[in-house]
Image: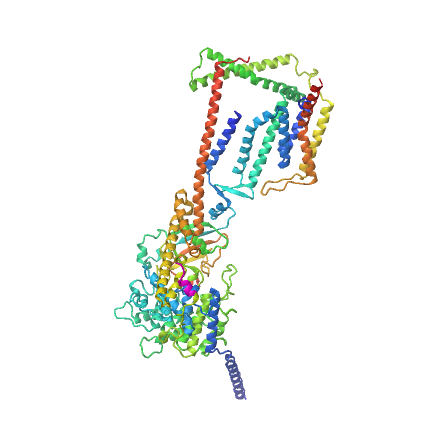
Amino acid sequence: MRRILSSFICIVILIAALSVNVQAESDSINKQYTSDDFYNIAAKIIDWKKQEIGTNGDYLICDKYLEKAGTTACDWYVIGMARLGIKDDYSSYLAVVKENIKSKYTLESKLSKVKSTEWHRAILTVNACRGNAEDLLGDGTINLVSDGIYNRGLTASLGKQGINGWIWGLIALNNMNYDIPENSYYTKEDIIKEIVSRQLSDGGFALSGKTGDPDITAMAIQALAPYYKNKNCNYNIDSVVDNAVMFLSRVQLENGGFQSFGTRNSESIAQVIIALCAINIDIQNDRRFIKNNNTMLDAIMSFRMNDGGFIHSFDYDNNNPESQPDKSNSMAGEQVLLAMAALYRYENNMNSLYDFTDINSNNIIDKSELTENDILFIHKSLDNVTSQDYSRAVSLLSKANNKDYQNRLNNIILKSDEIKNIIDTLNNDIYNVIYPLDKIGVSQRNSIEDLFKRYNSLSDIDKKYILYYDDLVTAKIKAESSQRSVIIMVILIIITIILALIVITRIRSRKKKNSLSDLYPNDEE
Amino acid sequence: MKKDLLILGFIVLIIVIIVNGTEFQTVDEYYLTHIDDIREDSQTVFISINCSEIYANWDMLDDNIKNSGYLPKDGVILDKTEYVLREGDTVFDVLNRAVRYNKIQMEYQGADMNIYNSVYIQGINYLYEFDCGELSGWLYKVNGEFPKYGCSSYVLKDGDIIEWIYTCELGQEYNLF
Amino acid sequence: MRFENYNPITIFIYFLIVFLITMFTVNPILLIISLIGGILFFISNNGIMRFLKDLAFYLPLFVLIAVTNPLFSHNGATPLFFMNGNAITYEAIIYGIFISVMIISVMYWCKCFGIIFTIDKILYLVGKISSKLAIVISMTVRFIPLIKSQSKKVSKVQKTMGLYTGNSYADRLKGSIRVFSSVLTWGLENGINVSDSMLSRGYGLKNRTSWSPFKITVSDIVLILISILLGITTLYGIYSKSLEFNFYPYITEVPTFLMSYISYSVFGLLCIIPFVIEIKEIVKWKYFLSKI
């Protein structure tokens, strides 16, 4: 009897357990995203970005966008679009980036004094635009891969900025599967070792401290991915990656998301998605990354705004209304864009996001036909050239095949470069002349006047680049009023002297009268 | 006699004016040139810039910096100074004004150049991020706490105390984003 | 009857009321009325030429006082310009101008008072209150010219004796100290002599009567009543706030209640009384002159 009862209870428990399981199974088939969905989400992000910078053309890369070419804020969008196969004007972007790097290479610090990641991002950008990072200008002068990765140690440690430098160095190195020549400062093993040695006891990676951070851990996986379960190499990093994946699975939140430094945010999820796609984990179905029936996609989509953009986090601080949890954010958008590109490529069995070896020129739009606007621009009088025309001229130069046009564009570039120099020296001179502001006096008047003349000779557009114009105005007024004060003082002193003279002569003449009357007194008594 | 006294009265008045100074300014000029004057009713904030932490981590410091001669002996680049708070001023605005007025070198990345949408301070007084180990850089505190925002997103209020410090242990203990 | 021929009490009461009102109001209309009244009275006493000549002194003085206020007072809501970082305000300038108006008008009234209210009138007035005080005042006033002439005499005598004739400051100082000490002892002696002789003549005794040229007539009483009536009406206007006026921080509007108009016209009447009386006398004189 007892046995029957116990076996009955066992069966009941088993059935209950099974039914729960079945329930879970049916729940997990909530929404399966397809590669088209990913592409559409990404396209919406691009639309949002276009709207943000204020262009309504077909392409994101426009004149306005090109002004900031080569910065973090722009590069990642270009990389993401390139990996999604979205058509855009990559050749213009490349032309401007090239020029920027060329001019930065004239400085002693080149791209950056300490941050090797500046080179790594540049390598990815140049490659995404089908440039050659190993020989940027085609004349053998600039080799970003050498300067930024394997020979970076000659100027500063690759990891001077921390683990970031090692990770991104390796990602950039894997990007085109670059070979490191003999006698280089670092070998690939060196870099991998540096990364591996920084794994924490919990399996994660972090900038500092003893606990892993999902962002850095994800980036480490992205860097090591090409060597994971790869029989062609023997770096033995499989366990490192496995531990890191376990760490990520462990710290995933109940809603499927991640938090970094105590803040739930969209960027951490995006980085983890990119990492998992790189090592072929199906994030929509892998049980390790479904928490409480929530996938990472569920979590990341909760950060999406109606305008197609994404936000960083939901935290709102009353003390600081500047941080907005209800306004799409460029950084979140760019990282989600990269995650969507990674997912899209994963679903279509393409190379991983940062493996550019399959890159081709299919999505580069053919803009060799110059528009009417472009031709007007080329024929613009040199007197009207401003510093802002630089990037557009550079991008047009990459397309113009007419000798006359090339000459004109070169002149515009020269002129605009010259204006940039004028602006820089003027900024410098202003800084040197007018500070400290409270010491401004009559003696600076002429030099301030001269600075003003130089400022006024700039075009309205260029004037915006003068940093401390307000202070210059203040300084001018100060100098003028101190001069005026000196003039007034002189006038007043002269008046005083005249008045004093009048009084003295009056007193003198009266005294004379008195002494005369003393001499000839007419007795009153 | 009476007229002499009158003239003497004028002379005394003019001398008083000359002694006090003869700077005449129109209202607009005055407000432009005295915008940073601290008055009884003006809102102010305090700012200080300090890099004394490098002396505790001297071994990690870049040799170039050690020999640059720019490092202040006590680590105080700018002592606690009071500045007028203008409408809508952020931490960056006040810092920028303070370093300009004191001719302290500073390099930063503009808000439109990076993904945080906020100005990022790379170096002050020739001391740059990562110069003292891979976790070193410039951080700011407002009223003793490390805010989670970039310095050009933090809008200040009256009486806030800003401290810019160079840290060699950037990271979780400062609860950065 | 000219204004100065009224009884001293009448004149004193009249001036007291005008002074009081002028000095304790900031209402610009009242101040201007007072200034005009003072100037008219001054002209009727001294003639227009004297007034124009005096303008050379009063106009610069007016400017001096008016300019001084904004230099030291930075109150007021409308800065016109800044001087050494201090605001020179519209309000302070206007306030300075009206302070100036007040001082100048008081000065004019004072001048008139000084001309009309001779020392015999003062003694009459004071003697009514206390005979001792009257003699003290009379002696003091008399002493000033006496000492002046005495010191001149002494110094002349000294000079003729060949004492302290050098040009050095020390010499002159010594000489004047000697003169001073001798004049002082002479003055004390003289004072005791005078008071003793007055006492011996029975001055100030209880039952003695004294004669005075000043009589209180019907017209005196009428004038006193009119002044008091007009003065009290104006003071009531000030008291009832219908003449309220502020310069800081904003200049308020000139009050235009019924009571304020009444006050302006009443005070105007008050201020113009002496002028009217004088003019009436002049006209009368001319009239009589032509008849003869």
Position in image of residue B14 (x %, y %): 48, 34
- Left or right placement of residue C274 versus residue C189 in this view: right
- Left or right placement of residue B131 versus residue C266 in this view: left
Residues in magenta?
A373-381
Is C70 drawn above or below residue B122 in the view shown? above
Choose top left, top right, bottom left or bottom right for residue C292: top right
Q: Residue at x 41, y 43 (%)?
A: A441
Q: What scheme was used to colour the molecule?
A: rainbow
Position in image of residue C213 (x %, y %): 69, 18
Asked whether the viewer can see residue A318, the reply is yes
- Left or right placement of residue C102 versus residue B28 in this view: right
- From the viewer's side, name the closer residue of A304 and C67: C67
Total of numbered circles in the picture? 0
Magenta span includes A378: yes
Asked whether the viewer can see residue A118, the reply is no
Position in image of residue B46 (x %, y %): 46, 51
Is A339 drawn above or below residue B89 in the view shown? below
Quadrant assignment for the N terminus of chain A: bottom right
**Main SS, magenta residues:** helix
Quadrant assignment for the C terminus of chain A: top right
Magenta span includes C86: no
- Residue at the far right: name it: C218
Position in image of residue C274 (x %, y %): 67, 27
